[in-house]
Image (cartoon, rainbow, N blue to C red):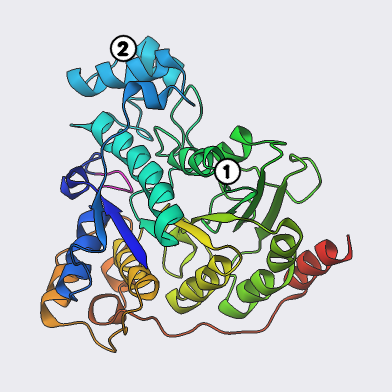
Amino acid sequence: MAIFVTHSVFREPGWSRLHPLSGNRQAAVIDICEMLGWLDEDHVRQCEPATRETLRAFHDADYIDAMMKASMSGQVSSEIRTRYKIGTMENPIFERVFERASASVGGSILAAREALIHGCAYHPAGGTHHGRRDTASGFCYFNDPVFAVQTLIDAGATPVLYVDIDAHHGDGVELAFADHPDVVMISTHEEGRWPHSGMNDGSGPRNAHNFPLPRGINDSEFLRLIDGPVAQIAARTKPAAVVIVAGADCLDGDPLSSMALSNIAFWDAIDRVRGFAPVQVVLGGGGYNPWTTVRAWAGLWGRLSGQPLPDALPEAAQERLRIMSCDLIDEDEMQDEWTTTLCDTSNRGPIRDEVKRLSETFLAA
């Protein structure tokens, strides 16, 4: 049984108008799932925002207090902006930003607890994997995946395998659990993309396995990595639980990456990773094309909850997608399937030599 974790704050608008996250992805995911009849009270849990005391288990007290004050006042001083990286274009202050960020943490804690009971829990508003102990980073104020992993550790569900398929390296989680004996981390991300970390050169922690991927990664190449080195790491680890950051910016058409996965391969990869452990926590992450992101995350809940995926979306769901907008995507870049269907066309293709080498180098180690 899969559980869907959310909070009312995720239906509210946030961010600034020109921010890559200005379109409310979370509200649209919930709307589409409701229109498809996929959210019933037996499978939905409302989380509570993490308290200041809870947040202190990872984040510095001074930083938490600065976030709370900024959220209440709607502004920050230049000193606070410089010190904590909040109130910037990257990490703006907006109405109820603290409540939203703390609810992401509360949702990931609840998702881990529900997964321990039911086997699988999905928190699409989670996945803020760049957050640091004492600063915001990369649109992430608090690091909710850290709390999901720690909740599983505290419950004795170890080792924990953390798998991050976002287009951007999960640097904040890697820093948090560097060399932790109960955590093994895997990140597949686009090579040369911000935050310019996650190299495959042995410079990372011993328990971190990074796979920087070439531009234009296709379905065949990505699933080869999942079925090859990622599966081998899982076999060595024998995890009791897996935490997945399902960043949808790895999909074709995302304006902040050059990866080219279909959502079919996205779902297939997550299904395979879920099979590595009996306890599965699935979080959201990046995703800056609102149409591909919302379809991917709604369809992911369909997969997790065993729903048949429709060939065409009902008219109400199509209209919900049509009213969305994104300043990062030009009108001539729009694809018909982004507003009419749930499933992409598969993007299978040849496996390039650099992908073969990335896989074979690990397997030979």
Are there few (<14), some (14-19), or many (20+) residues within 10 Å of tag 1? few
Q: How many marks?
A: 2
Residue at 17 percent across and 46 percent down: it is 8
Residue 212 in the image, given as x and y percentages of width and height = 67, 56
Quarter of the image for the C terminus: give it: bottom right
Quadrant into which the N terminus falls: bottom left
Magenta span = 18-23
Name the residue at 21% across, 82% down: 313
The answer to whether any part of residue 327 appears in the image is: no
Tell me the residue that label 2 is attached to: 77
Residue 36: image quadrant is bottom left
Q: Is residue 278 magenta?
A: no
Residue 364 relative to residue 335: left or right: right
Name the one closer to the observer, 305 or 90: 305
Label 2: few (<14), some or many (≥20) within 10 Å?
Answer: few
Residue drawn at point x = 21 percent, y = 43 percent: 17
Q: Which one is earlier in the sequence, the residue at label 1 or at label 2? A: 2
List the residue tagged with mark 1: 156
Question: Is 295 located above or below residue 145 in the figure?
Answer: below
Please tell me whether mark 2 sits on a helix, a strand or a loop: loop
The nearer-to-camera label among 1 and 2 is: 1
